[in-house]
Image (cartoon, rainbow, N blue to C red):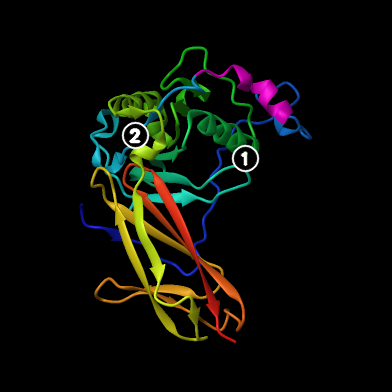
Amino acid sequence: MKTKIIFRASILLCFIFTIGFSSCKSLTDPYAAPSEGSLEKFKEMSGYYNWPGKNGPVRDGIDLSKCAIPSLSDIPIVTKPPFFSYIPEEENRKILGYYQSVWQIDRQNLMEVRVVFAETCEEAHEYAICSYFNSSNPQVPKPDDVVIAGDISFFNGHSFIRNNIFVMITPRGELVNRKSAVAKDIDNLLLARPTASSSEEFKPRIQRFEIAKSLVESKTQTKLFLEVADPKGSELYYFWRVTAGSIGEDEHGQFYYYSSDEAAPGTTQTITLIVINDRGYCRTSSIDVKIKQ
């Protein structure tokens, strides 16, 4: 397995990334969302139930920062690793893997690419429609008459869905004219990836996640034991969430749980590990620890 990149935080702050386009909404704008409309109405306006590809296979993901994208070959990528993060779970939806990178000439001329890796094709469609609906400037995503990329594309290639992968492209300045070419190049890279009937084939495996003691003193540190593997030997990214306290790592790579003042005596705290590989797939595991009275 490649060298692991570790990202840790006592409480990880993640943002829900949504899409907004700078077109003015009006009564005559066919893409404008209803001012007081429901998600169901929004789906009807977009033709959501007729979107193709909801029942296809699951496709393996990709790290675009390591790929040759012909339409961006003359522009440097400026995003610093890690490129992968996650989108927090919601009701009826698990945590999703998330990728983001920016190619930039200068601040006025850049290309941002964001990718969401869902567990099923249907989940990717649902995430896409909810992203548009919850956007600060919601626009009804009518499918392009001529598909630019993926099984279905929107807004002339600003975004597309290929199987279970939702791709969002945001160009600025002179790079706006490369939008469609970038979408096609990324889609060609995705098409070269293997497919499976389930995302389980692509996920990392948490083989062991334990704490040395399940009953700990307040304001102490306790060892965590972790064994993780990836079926394809991919690079792995680690994220931590704790209800109270924090996670630390020593110079030898040993992880610890620190029970801070936040962790009141007699309470039970939950530690959650999120592991994401460099193909966008993640797995989570949680353990409980009780703070001694």
State the extent of the magenta-drawn residues as a range.
40-52
Please, is residue 120 above or below residue 112 in the view?
A: above
Contact check, label 2 and label 1, Cβ < 8 Å: no
Query: In the image as oriented, which residue stretches furthest toward the top?
Result: 145
Which residue type does callout 2 highlight? Asp
Q: Identify whether 248 is placed above or below 155.
A: below
Q: Main secondary structure of the magenta part?
A: helix
Nearest to the observer: residue 63 or residue 58: 58
* Circle 2 residue: 60
**Callout in the foreground (2, 1):** 2
Q: Residue at x 47, y 12 (%)?
A: 146
Q: Nearer the viewer, residue 132 or 126?
A: 126
Residue 160 has which mark?
none
Q: Secondary structure at mark 1?
A: loop
At horizontal 41% and vertical 21% (from top left) the residue drawn is: 149
**Residue appearing at x 40%, y 67% in the figure:** 210
48, 111: nearer the viewer: 48
Which residue is rendered at x = 26% and y = 76% of the image?
251
Which image quarter: residue 254?
A: bottom left
Residue 117: give x, y in percent of width and height. 43, 38
Q: Is residue 88 visible?
A: yes
Magenta-colored stretch includes residue 72: no
Q: Secondary structure at mark 2?
A: loop
Quadrant location of residue 100? top left
The numbered dot on residue 135 is 1
